[in-house]
Structures are given as C-alpha cells and as structure tokens.
Image (cartoon, coloured by chain):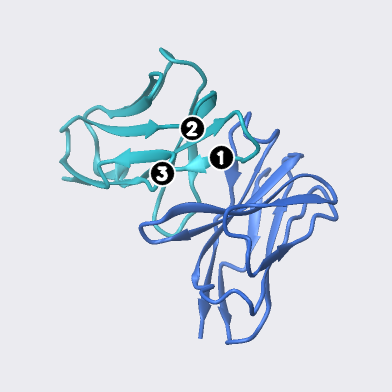
Chain colours: A blue, B cyan
Amino acid sequence: DGGITQSPKYLFRKEGQNVTLSCEQNLNHDAMYWYRQDPGQGLRLIYYSQIVNDFQKGDIAEGYSVSREKKESFPLTVTSAQKNPTAFYLCASSMYRGLTEAFFGQGTRLTVV
Amino acid sequence: EDQVTQSPEALRLQEGESSSLNCSYTVSGLRGLFWYRQDPGKGPEFLFTLYSAGEEKEKERLKATLTKKESFLHITAPKPEDSATYLCAVFYSGNTPLVFGKGTRLSVIA
C-alpha cells in the first residue's frame, strides 16, 4: 500500500542525547515536511525539502537537523541543542510544494526521560 | 499575529445537532485551503482542498466552503464518530509550505 511510514511510534530520549526519527514514503512525492505538534499549538514547521539533497528551515528549526539523500526518505534528528523536545512529530509529503494536498504519517511521540 | 485562525477552539454537539467550524486567514494571494481531520495520537487525514472563493466540496456529513477571507466546515447531523480535531491549512504566494491553524476539537455526544 502507498503511504508514509514513520518510526518508531514512541521514542524516549535521555538528556543530552541525539535521536533520529525515520520517515519513508512510497508515493513518489517530491516534497517532504516535518512538523511538530504540541497541545494547543497546532502544527509548526521544522524543516521541508522539495528535492533530493536540498532542504529549507521552517519556523522552529533550531535544535533539529535533516537530510534528504533519497527521494523516499527524510529523517529528522533531534539534537541535544533542542531544549524542549518532548512533542508529537509528524512527517508529511506532497506531490508539489503546497499546490497539492499533503499526506501525513502516523507520527512519533518523543519523550525526554 | 496568526495567519490562520480557527474557531471555536472546542465544540460540543449532541448527535444530530448541525453546526459549522470556521477558519479565517489573513494571508494574501491564497492558492489553496486544506481541511484535515485528526484523531488523538494519529496523523492528520486529508479531507478537502478549496482553491477559489465560492468553491464547495462535500463528503458524507461534511461540507467545506470558501470565501475571500474564510472557510467553513459544515457538519450536518453529526455522529459520535465525527468526534476529532479538525485542522485548516493554507498555501499562499510565498516560500513557506502549508500554514496550519490550531484546530477545532469537536466532540459529538450520543
């Protein structure tokens, strides 16, 4: 089945650790996105990528890093510089940036322990 | 200032009690407005795209409409399974991808 797969579903991070969230899509979409969702805050854009080997910062990129080495994959690393990483992270993809609907994965809930 | 504002923040309806959710936007050069449904602990599910003022889309008990400044999501005779958070997002003439509102939490009570 075509879709977006995020893993893991739940992730626990110790203080000072870097962790990487996986996002894979088999929809042949060009654009991919990472959003962060906190209670009462809606979805906030972390990074996005329109083509392989290119990505742009979103509104809250500090403390995060991404790569786009393959069209299908857009992993997000939450670094130790991110002071408040506990949140629900959502990956999405679309055929073209903004012009068509974005489809979302099922999310990764990251908790700092 | 928020570019996309959704109201109300939360809405509680009796089963069968029709109502509307509002999404107002301040961006200029709107190129598309999107509605999503999100269940707790899950990713948003795409519902509708609206591209121009006057456009309407329907799906089961949901109907989305668009004007030059806002969109409405009308829910006719809702059922408990319609309970979810409904998100609105816009794409406009600029360099950023979809900009989301904070959502409306809908609860439908049997």
Q: Amino acid at mark 1?
A: Leu
One can see residue A61 in this view: yes
Asked if marks 2 and 3 fall on the same chain, the answer is yes
Tell me residue A109's x, y (percent). Answer: 52, 68
Residue located 56% across and 39% down the image? B98
Tell me residue A1's x, y (percent). Answer: 67, 44
In the image, B81 versus B27, the foreground residue is B27
Q: Amino acid at mark 3?
A: Asp
Q: Which mark is residue B98?
A: 1
Tell me residue A86's x, y (percent). Answer: 50, 73
Residue located 69% across and 47% down the image? A32
In the image, B2 versus A96, the foreground residue is B2
- Left or right: residue B88 versus residue B92 is left
Furthest toward the front, the residue is B1
One can see residue B60 in this view: no
Tag 1, which secondary structure? loop
Tell me residue A85's x, y (percent). Answer: 54, 73
Q: Residues within 10 Å of mark 1 (few under 14, many from 20)?
A: many
- Left or right: residue B6 versus residue A53 is left
Instruction: Look at mark 2 in the image and give the residue it sits on.
Output: B34
Chain letter of disc 2 in the image: B
As displayed, is residue B37 above or below residue B42? above
Residue located 76% across and 51% down the image? A55
Are the residues at dot 2 and dot 1 in contact (C-beta closer than 8 Å)? yes
As displayed, is residue B55 above or below residue A98? above
In the image, A82 versus B108, the foreground residue is A82
Instruction: Look at mark 3 in the image and give the residue it sits on.
Output: B2
Q: CA distance from mark 2 to mark 3?
A: 17 Å
Chain letter of disc 3 in the image: B
